Image (cartoon, grey):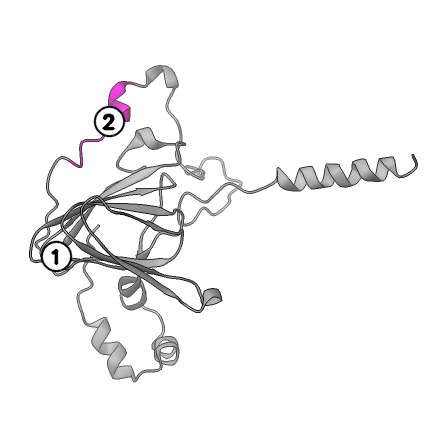
Amino acid sequence: MKFLPVSFLILALATATALADDPSPLQDICVATNDLDSGVFVNGKFCKDPKQATADDFLFMGFRNLGNTSNPLGSKVTQAFINQFPGLNTLGISMARIDFAPGGLNPPHFHPRGSETLVVVEGTLLVGFVTSNQLNNTFFTKVLYKGDVFAIPIGLIHFQMNIENTYALAFASFSTQNPGVITIANAVFGAKPPISIDVLTKALQVDKKVIDYFRAQFWYDNN
């Protein structure tokens, strides 16, 4: 019996640890402050009085129209994240519509806060994601046809490309109200202020002229 209190203590500590998990981050940065007058953001969004909610709060009509694919990437992502669709707040879900011109590309990017499932509605897409260094950067790729669904784990670099000469359309769903988007080329070569040239030449093992060339390009954002 003398060991019983120790057992209860261990159980209590284990339970406390299990219940002490932090909530998922819902924005890129959220610096703590003790100044309540300047504390305008929380990890997510403030909520309106539920008694003032209407059906319109839970309606999003942004997917009705074709996305404008007349850009260097030949694709357009229409987001239905928390900023565009307030009714998603606290629901842990969001969506996106992706329109592709023939040969259009949604370039390599990742979502730091959510996993993704992609369904092809029209056309044929080449899709793929790359695992982390832990799994030797293994590349998983498939060609998707109308009706096919592909899953992309949270935080992994991935892309979609229209490999036919016809229009293509896909819808993505996410496991968070605000998945975020980090496009690789834009982040590396279009950061403001720019990343140190010494960092990039050493990291990519290329000459400064190569970095200058890439920085001079126009890195289009299709979101």
The quadrant holding residue 202 is bottom left
Crowd band around label 1 with a 10 angstrom C-alpha radius: few (<14), some (14–19), many (20+): some
**Residue that sits furthest to the top in the current view:** 51
**Residue denoted by label 2:** 59
* Residues under numbered marks 1 and 2 in contact, where contact means CB atoms less than 8 Å apart: no
Task: Identify the residue position indicated by label 1 in the image.
Answer: 74
For the residue pair 37 and 67, the one nearer the viewer reads as 67
- Residue at 40% x, 67% y is 137
Question: Magenta stretch containing residue 91, yes or no?
Answer: no
Q: Quadrant of the N terminus?
A: top right
- In reply to whether residue 57 is colored magenta, the answer given is yes
Magenta span: 54-63
**Which residue is drawn at the image coordinates 38% and 57% (left, top)?**
156
**Residue 103: quarter of image:** bottom left
Three-letter code, disc 1 = Gly
Callout 2: helix, strand or loop?
A: loop
As helix, strand or loop, the secondary structure at mark 1 comes to loop
User: Is residue 96 positioned above or below 140 on the image?
Assistant: above
- Residue 81 rendering spot, x and y as whole percentages: 30, 39
The dominant secondary structure in magenta is loop
- Closer-to-camera residue (117/20): 117
User: Which label is found at residue 223?
Assistant: none
Q: Amino acid at mark 2?
A: Leu
